[in-house]
Each structure stands twice: as C-alpha cells, then as structure tokens.
Amino acid sequence: MIPEQIARHRHQVLARIQAATERAGRPAGSVALIAVSKKQPPAAIRAAHAAGQRAFGESYLQEALDKQALLADLDDIEWHFIGRLQSNKTRQIAAHFDWVHGLADATHARRLSEQRPASRRPLNVCLQLNLSGESSKGGVAPEDVSALLAQCAELPGLRVRGLMTLPAPSEDEAEQRRPFRELREWRDRLATPECPLDVLSMGMSDDLEAAILEGATQVRIGTAVFGARPTN
Ligand SMILES: *Cc1c(COP(=O)(O)O)cnc(C)c1O
C-alpha cells in the first residue's frame, strides 16, 4: 500500500475505535491502537509512523529484528511482541521489545525477567488466557492463571500489566463479545491494588468493536491498517 493509503486506513481505524468507545460509554482516548505490522515491509511501518502511529505489533522474531535494525532512526517506536513465545527466543525478545502479549508459561516468564537488560525498565507483559471455545492452543488455562500471576509478580524484570486473549473468529457480534467479556471478568477477579491488571489486550480488525464494548484497552489491528498480508 502507498503511504497515503496507510495513513487513511489508520485514520478510519481510529474513527472506528472512537465510535465504539463512545457507544460503550467509555472515556475518549481509553483504547490504544497497536498497529500489527507482521509480514509488512519497513516502508509500511514508516508510513504509519509518519501518520502518528507509535505502537507496533510483531509476531515473528527474526523478521521483527531485521525491520527494527532498518528502522533504528525511528527511536520513539514502542514494540509489542504478539507472537508465540519459545524459550530459545526469550533473550532477544527481552532485549528488543517493550511489551510481550501472550505470556502463558512460568519458564518463559523467568527467562524474560532474567534476560531483561538492566539498563531498561521492566518488560511490560500481558498474560494470555485460553478461554472457552478458543481455537488457538496458546494461553494459560483460567484455573492456572492465578498461580502464574503470583509467580510473575515476584520477577523484577517483568511488570504484569493485564490480560490478553485471541479468540476464534466469529461474524456475530454477540458471539464475538463472549470471550472478551470472559476476559474482563477474569481480570475483575484477579486484580489487586498492587497489580490492577488495567490492560485488556483484545480485539483485531474484524472484532474491535465487540472488544471495546467489553472493555479492551489495547486493540491489535493489522489488516485494517496495512491491508492484507502477503501470503507465503
Ligand atoms: C495477526 C495478529 C493480529 C492482527 O490481526 P488482523 O486481523 O490483521 O487485525 C492481532 N493479534 C495477534 C496475536 C495476531 O497474531
């Protein structure tokens, strides 16, 4: 896509976010856009950045590191790792990202904390919940999340910010809202004054309205900003 198209699409997504935020009766500005740039070239990230975008989501570590090196001059980007975690990748993720969505495993949590460079603030993390009817195998089972949360709270290199979920796609808004509502209810149960879990990372291009109606504070949007990803 040409830069003007990316800027226009981003603008349209921000308008959708604003409309849904109003419909939900929530304060303006309470939902942040993470532009998911996986499989998109560096030029697409530059175009979104020029239009004002600062938070970008990437799923594939090597691809992300290559692009970060080419975009090093854009030093105010906030990088979110939204892909599947693997133990052999935690060191690079801890060094090169600001946020990790999709943490679901105590070993990964320990490694990310130990490997977070001392020069950087603790890594922001969201714990991924595997809710009923979820197609993806990722995420911690709800009955195990409280133990994982307690373990993460002890790790100095991590700052647990909230919860994330990645439900199976659905066309129907009521159906879309169900897992998002469940995630919010889990947050309400698990939150404490020390760890308020005020981030709910949920909603993608096709269900961001449903997610915002259920309380999303970060939506992860790829296609609606950048267009279809190249398939290979
Ligand atoms: C790819 C991806 C997205 C963005 O999906 P779109 O449908 O393109 O908006 C969001 N979250 C995760 C975890 C993803 O892998």
Image (cartoon, helix red, strand yellow):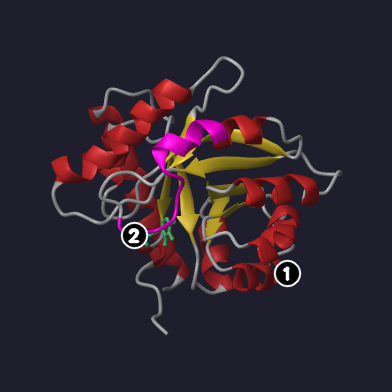
Q: Quadrant of ligand 1?
A: bottom left
Q: Is 193 placed above or below 36 here?
A: above
> The residue tagged with tag 2: helix, strand or loop?
helix
Q: Is mark 2 within 8 Å of ligand 1?
A: yes
Question: Is the N terminus in the top left, top right, bottom left or bottom right quadrant?
Answer: bottom left
Q: Residues within 10 Å of mark 1 (few under 14, many from 20)?
A: few
Residue 18 x/y as whole percent: 33, 36
Residue 148 x/y as whole percent: 56, 37
Q: Is residue 215 left or right of residue 98?
A: left
Residue 187 x/y as whole percent: 42, 28
Residue 98 x/y as whole percent: 66, 47
The quarter of the picture where residue 71 lies is: bottom right
Q: Which mark is residue 69?
A: 1
Magenta stretch holds residue 137: yes
Q: Is residue 163 left or right of residue 22?
A: right
Q: Which residue is label 2 attached to?
A: 224
Q: Amino acid at mark 1?
A: Ala
**Residue 56 vs residue 48, the one in the foreground:** 56
Q: Is residue 161 visible?
A: no
Q: Amino acid at mark 2?
A: Ala
Please report the residue visible at 53 percent of the width from the left and 41 percent of the height from the top: 126
* Residue contact between numbered discs 2 and 1, judged by CB atoms under 8 Å: no
The quarter of the picture where residue 65 lies is: bottom right
Q: Is residue 49 visible?
A: yes
Q: Is mark 1 within 8 Å of ligand 1?
A: no
Q: Is 17 placed above or below 228 here?
A: above
Question: Which span is picked out in magenta?
Answer: 135-147
**Residue 5 vs residue 61, the one in the foreground:** 61
| Marker count (numbered) | 2
**Which mark sits nearer the N-terminus, 2 or 1?**
1
* CA distance separating discs 2 and 1: 25 Å
